[in-house]
Image (cartoon, rainbow, N blue to C red):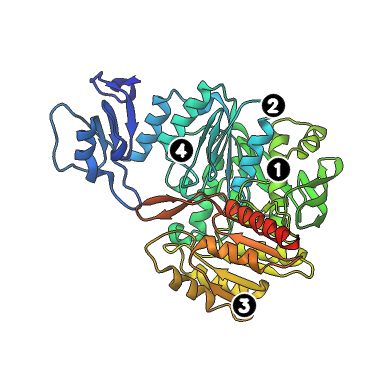
């Protein structure tokens, strides 16, 4: 709780119990910030907020009416004020922990999640990202990647109360552009990769790159910037547009194809693990990790470089490798007793589909590649033809299905993808549960089933909210178990 004159330069000393940017959650004696979002404008909901109990309204545009007893504060940028006030209201919580921000098109979840788990062996850690919010006994689901400033600082505040010493935060390009992390204190900033995705939001590649660069501008002085040496284009853009970064932060690099502080060489890929030689400065080790696909070797290097930035020795880093486990829904091999493999992956972008298909195609041997996936209705429609063409190139059998319960015609979306699938057998089964079961029914020994698009998610997104969904892994595992038991009975 804070007094209003502790948050703003006003005379009123009314007690503020909470702060909000969504009128549906406003409570008694609160501040409501009128945010102009991508879908709606908070200025339209001022009356609702006041009815709910707001005592102060922060706005940037003239309002339709003003009520007695309400404090109105007009500012030039509500988002800037929201960041400042959220940080102040919760007593600057991110400054009381070691903050590790991870940005890039892909790999954020794997890096942030694994770093939090590895460090969690030594001290209390928090995690915020696409797989939810976790710290102490708290575990919460999320529908996005980077929460708004109020949610962030409220959870950071609770982390501090739980004696959490550090946190990892997935920082999306959207979150950076929309100022969601402007008031967060970062000690380490990690960059994974940059692909030309989210163009419907950013418009140009320069805008996308500018968003990524912003995380490094938010680094505290003397912090660590961890860069992917193989991402030459972004590194050039970063040094060109942030010339003072080397004076502001310490730079560490990782890579596979380019010289770096931490490198992987002589990589061997398998369906359920990877093996490679790792070079940490002047030290050399041979390691194995239960993480698969080339892009995840790069993610693993980002993880290890983060540990190096936290002053772990090369021997300690290599010892930590044996505790690395796959992240839920990120190239996760589902344990089944049949002689085929099932892999679940979040796989949101066209380049993700290409990387996943290409990897499985290279390690499956004589088996077939069976893919189950769909496409979100409201997202980039051009992606549909791209992933259809990729499936045609790499897959042997394709089952197209729903990914989320939106208002679009699921069968129509799947048909657009199917138009590009000429060589493999392809069918449309709109119910995702049945689609997964059909893939398992069709699998033979040596085959690989890829279930793509939802990863860890246990909900279906619709225009009116989320509906429960057991999750791809659960459905696949339970059906495979049932099928295995039935086969045993038949054999007897």
Task: Provide the residue designation for mark 2.
Answer: 122
Label annotation for residue 325: 1
State the separation of the CA atoms marked 4 and 2.
Answer: 29 Å
Task: Provide the residue designation for mark 4.
Answer: 182
Q: Closer to the camera: disc 3 or disc 2?
A: 3
Instruction: Say which residue appears at 43% left-offset and 54% top-offset.
Output: 461
Q: Report crowding for label 1: few under 14, some 14 to 19, many 20 or more residues within 10 A (C-alpha).
A: some
Mark closest to the chain's N terminus, 4 or 3: 4
**Dots 2, 1 in contact, CB < 8 A:** no
Residue 109 horizontal/vertical position (percent): 59, 46
**Dots 4, 1 in contact, CB < 8 A:** no
Q: Closer to the camera: disc 4 or disc 3?
A: 3
Mark closest to the chain's N terminus, 1 or 3: 1
Mark closest to the chain's N terminus, 4 or 1: 4
Q: Report crowding for label 3: few under 14, some 14 to 19, many 20 or more residues within 10 A (C-alpha).
A: some
SS for callout 3: strand
State the separation of the CA atoms marked 1 and 3.
Answer: 34 Å
Image quadrant in which the C terminus is located: bottom right
Please tell me in which quadrant of the rendered image residue 190 appears: top right
187 left or right of 153?
right
284 left or right of 472?
right
Q: Is residue 160 above or below residue 434?
A: above
State the separation of the CA atoms marked 3 and 2.
Answer: 50 Å
SS for callout 1: loop
């Amino acid at each position: 709780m804070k007094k209003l004159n502790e948050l703003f330069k006003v005379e009123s000393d009314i007690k503020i119990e909470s702060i909000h940017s969504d009128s549906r959650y406003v409570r008694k004696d609160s501040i409501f910030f009128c945010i102009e979002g991508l879908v709606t404008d908070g200025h339209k909901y001022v009356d609702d907020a006041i009815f709910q109990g707001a005592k102060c309204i922060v706005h940037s545009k003239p309002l339709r009416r003003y009520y007695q007893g309400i404090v109105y504060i007009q500012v030039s940028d509500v988002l800037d004020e929201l960041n400042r006030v959220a940080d102040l209201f919760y007593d600057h919580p991110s400054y009381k922990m070691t903050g590790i921000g991870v940005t890039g098109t892909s790999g954020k979840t794997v890096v942030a999640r694994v770093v939090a788990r590895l460090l969690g062996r030594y001290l209390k850690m928090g995690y915020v990202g696409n797989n939810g919010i976790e710290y102490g006994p708290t575990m919460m689901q999320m529908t996005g990647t980077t929460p708004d400033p109020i949610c962030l600082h409220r959870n950071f505040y609770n982390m501090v109360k739980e004696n959490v010493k550090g946190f990892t935060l997935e920082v999306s390009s959207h979150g950076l552009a929309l100022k969601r992390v402007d008031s967060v204190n970062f000690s380490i900033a990690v960059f994974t990769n940059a692909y030309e995705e989210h163009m419907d939001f950013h418009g140009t590649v320069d805008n996308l790159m500018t968003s990524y660069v912003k995380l490094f501008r938010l680094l505290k002085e003397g912090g660590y910037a961890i860069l992917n040496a193989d991402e030459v284009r972004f590194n050039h853009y970063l040094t060109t547009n942030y010339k003072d970064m080397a004076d502001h932060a310490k730079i560490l690099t990782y890579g596979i194809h380019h010289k770096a502080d931490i490198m992987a060489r002589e990589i061997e890929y398998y369906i359920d693990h990877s093996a490679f030689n790792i070079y940490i400065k002047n030290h050399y080790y041979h390691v194995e990790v239960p993480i698969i696909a080339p892009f995840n070797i790069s993610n693993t290097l980002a993880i290890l470089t983060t540990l190096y930035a936290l002053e772990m020795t090369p021997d300690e880093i290599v010892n930590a490798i044996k505790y690395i486990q796959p992240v839920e829904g990120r190239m996760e091999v589902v344990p089944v007793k049949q002689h085929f493999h099932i892999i679940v992956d979040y796989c949101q972008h066209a380049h993700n589909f290409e990387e996943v298909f290409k990897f499985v195609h290279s390690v499956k041997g004589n088996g077939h590649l069976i893919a189950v996936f769909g496409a979100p209705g409201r997202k980039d429609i051009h992606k549909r033809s791209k992933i259809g063409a990729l499936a045609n190139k790499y897959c042997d059998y394709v089952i197209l299905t729903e990914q989320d319960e939106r208002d679009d015609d699921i069968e129509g979306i799947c048909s657009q993808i199917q138009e590009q699938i000429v060589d493999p057998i392809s069918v449309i089964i709109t119910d995702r549960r049945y689609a997964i079961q059909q893939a398992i029914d069709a699998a033979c020994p040596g085959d690989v089933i890829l279930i793509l698009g939802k990863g860890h998610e246990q909900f279906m997104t619709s225009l009116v909210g989320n509906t429960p969904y057991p999750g791809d892994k659960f459905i696949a595992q339970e059906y495979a178990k049932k099928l295995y038991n039935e086969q045993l009975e038949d054999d007897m």
